[in-house]
Image (spheres, grey):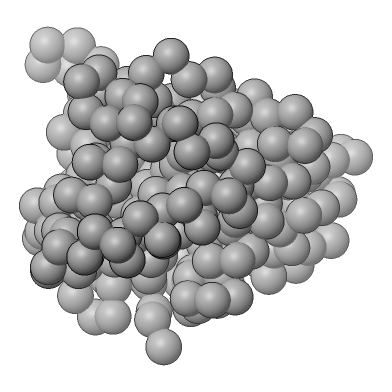
Amino acid sequence: MTKFEIRGLRADVLIGEEERQEILTGVDLTVNSGETHAIMGPNGSGKSTLAYAIAGHPRYEVTEGEVLLDGENVLDMEVDERARAGVFLAMQYPVEVPGVSMSNFLRSAMTAARGEAPKLRQFSKELQGAMKGLGIESAFASRGVNEGFSGGEKKRHEILQMELLKPKIAVLDESDSGLDVDALKIVADGINRAKEENGLGVMLITHYTRILDHVEPDHVHVFAGGRIAESGGPELANVLETDGYERFVKAGA
């Protein structure tokens, strides 16, 4: 069983040429295989900083703490090594990579993750099956990565990558934002498949409860002031939907 542990994580963000500001102020969280942890909180609370610090974004500097994947500190790894170890980040704003087709990108990523290139016939079968499950037209395989994609199409392609790469832990940064009702259900189904088939552990960062109607969380955490302010079961999400985050923001001020 995979265990992903965040212990006492503190991190700064670069806000000027030399000026830094502390955003994460001591995060503690454990995610096990097959679990979904919803991370909910207001804008500016540090949710995305947590995601990028885990992934190794150069703008964010971890100043204290550790992030352990099955006992190994991923903070000691380069960014590509974290991905190969089984940590996946679905970005809030997926970037475009013109000139690199989705199929070539995905096959290269799968080669890096598995240590050997998948055979073309098997890769094609896996790719087409995953695309069909996510309602992605086969023509998208030959298009540049996210090039000219709508917001919803980009989010579905993030989930496509996750399904094909089969990571141990997925950090999904607002994968529900900008999605209509149908696209939201498709993305949620992809997350649920990955959990069921591969025992994926999920950190689902979101503002709203609507995706939680389709991806049932095992735990809900309120993020405020750069740390987890309160944790509970799925019922906590309903409290937040009704009452908002104000009391947590005031408590952390």
In this rendering, does residue 216 appear at all? Answer: yes
Image height of 223 relative to 99, above or below: below
The residue positioned 28% from the left and 72% from the top of the image is 69
| Residue 153 x/y as whole percent | 54, 29
Side of 207 relative to 84 (left or right): right
Indicate the position of residue 200 as horizontal and vertical percent values: 48, 70
Residue situated in front as seen by the camera: 246 or 155: 155
- The residue at the far front in this view is 121
On the rendered structure, is 229 left or right of 168?
A: right
Viewer-nearest residue: 101 or 196: 101
Q: Residue furthest right?
A: 242
Question: For the point 30% across and 41% down, which residue is it?
Answer: 103
Q: Position of residue 95 (x, y in %)?
A: 34, 24
Q: Is residue 224 visible?
A: no
Q: Is residue 191 above or below residue 105?
A: below
Quadrant of residue 206 within the rendered picture: top right
Of 128 and 91, which appears nearest the observer? 128
Q: Residue at (64%, 37%) from the top-left corner? A: 176
From the viewer's perspective, tell me whether residue 108 is left or right of residue 133. left
Pick the residue in front: 34 or 53.
Answer: 34
Q: How many marks?
A: 0
What residue occupies the far bottom of the structure in this picture?
1
Quadrant placement of the C terminus: top right
Rendered image quadrant of residue 175? top right
For the N terminus, the image quarter is bottom left
- The residue depicted at 19 percent of the width and 75 percent of the height is 72
User: Where residue 149 appears, x then y in whole percent?
Assistant: 48, 20
